[in-house]
């Protein structure tokens, strides 16, 4: 299981929009063309889940 | 159409391939799965045929198979977070899951290592039942409080998904698919995938995170449109 970080901030803090067309934090060095989608979409790394672009506590 | 290269016809008629890296113990992977399904369904008659393949990703390899305590206990100890903070986070994800039609119950969730569950998913893929098992495992873990780290329980869930009990047990006890699980994890590393869920469309486009259903619908429409354009 994972815990989310930064989710509470999702309702109030502005999201830092990912760079358009660039690689997102979840796949740096990715061979894929990254589609940015919703900047507020959660991902999980290890036991931590967060919104890419928000600082992890 | 007369004279059209067979390759183009094949592009249009073959399903769109979608590879998904996820972990059974990832709450946003289950939510992302449901959002993807909703996005696909929302396209109605315009929905393209898709072929989905799940790939293994182990979020926390150091997780014990058996952990005595609640999810809050585990996360508070493991991450050094205040219990109240963990409670807030679990309440948040439970609320988002509910909006996706998923009834998460962290009070009964049994934290465990998911390596064997991933081996079973590879067995299920070989049997053509991976999607059924994926849904069964997510539901068992997040809503039913089932233990998805023990072979006996996994065999029961395999049967629920339409798999043969003896075959599933043999696959798990022999570790026959352990190398396939590690290959998936290594492939994720080679692709630079550091977080899940991670979706790859047609081996070309990457989509990270539990995106809203509308985003998945847009991506599917875009990919299908490109295929139509290529075949025109």
Image: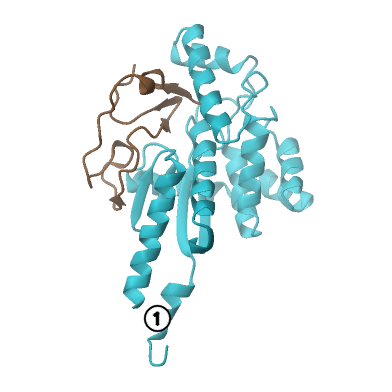
Chain colours: A brown, B cyan
Horizontal side, residue B24 vs residue A35: left or right: right
- In front: B138, or B94? B94
**Position of the C terminus of chain B by quadrant:** bottom left
Q: Which residue is drawn at 49% across and 31% down?
A: B61
| B31 displayed left or right of A53 | right
Judge the density around disc 1: few (<14), some (14-19), many (≥20) Cα neighbours within 10 Å. few
Residue at 52% across / 56% down in the picture? B52
Instruction: Tell me if residue B82 comes above or below residue B27 in the rendering.
Output: above
When the figure is inspected, residue B38 is found, relative to residue A16, above or below; the finding is below
Instruction: Determine the residue positioned at 61% across, 33% down.
Output: B102
* Residue marked by disc 1: B7
- Residue A38 makes an appearance in the image: yes
Report in which chain the residue with disc 1 lies.
Answer: B
Question: What is the x, y in percent for residue A42?
Answer: 41, 32
Relative image position of residue B97 (x, y in whole percent): 55, 31
Q: Which residue is drawn at 37% across and 69% down?
A: B227
Pick the residue in front: B222 or B193.
Answer: B222
- Residue B57: x, y in percent? 48, 41
In the picture provided, is A4 more to the left or to the right than A26?
right
Q: Between residues B66 and B124, which one lies in front from this camera angle?
A: B124
Q: Is residue B102 above or below residue B173?
A: above
């Amino acid at each position: 299981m994972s815990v989310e970080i930064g989710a509470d901030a999702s309702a109030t803090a502005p999201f830092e929009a990912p760079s358009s067309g660039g690689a997102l934090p979840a796949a740096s060095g990715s061979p894929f063309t990254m589609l940015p989608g919703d900047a507020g979409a959660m991902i999980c790394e290890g036991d931590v889940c967060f919104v890419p672009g928000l600082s992890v506590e | 159409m007369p004279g059209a290269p067979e390759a183009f016809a094949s592009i249009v008629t073959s399903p769109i391939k979608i590879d998904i890296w996820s972990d059974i113990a990832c709450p946003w992977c289950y939510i992302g799965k449901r959002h993807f399904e909703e996005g696909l369904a929302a396209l109605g008659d315009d929905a393209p045929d898709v072929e989905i393949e799940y790939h293994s990703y182990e979020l926390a390899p150091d997780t014990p198979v058996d952990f005595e305590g609640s999810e809050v206990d585990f996360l508070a100890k493991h991450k050094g977070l205040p219990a109240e903070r963990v409670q807030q986070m679990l309440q948040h994800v439970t609320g988002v899951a509910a909006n996706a039609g998923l009834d998460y119950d962290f009070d009964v969730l049994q934290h465990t290592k998911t390596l064997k569950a991933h081996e079973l998913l590879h067995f299920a893929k070989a049997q053509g039942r991976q999607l059924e098992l994926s849904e069964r495992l997510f539901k068992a873990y997040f809503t039913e409080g089932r233990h998805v780290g023990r072979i006996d329980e996994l065999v029961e869930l395999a049967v629920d998904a339409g798999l043969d009990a003896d075959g599933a047990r043999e696959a798990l006890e022999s570790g026959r698919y352990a190398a396939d699980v590690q290959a998936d994890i290594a492939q994720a590393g080679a692709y630079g995938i550091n977080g899940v869920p991670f979706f790859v469309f047609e081996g070309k486009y990457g989509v990270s995170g539990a995106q809203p259903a509308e985003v998945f619908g847009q991506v599917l429409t875009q990919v299908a449109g490109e295929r139509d354009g290529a075949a025109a």
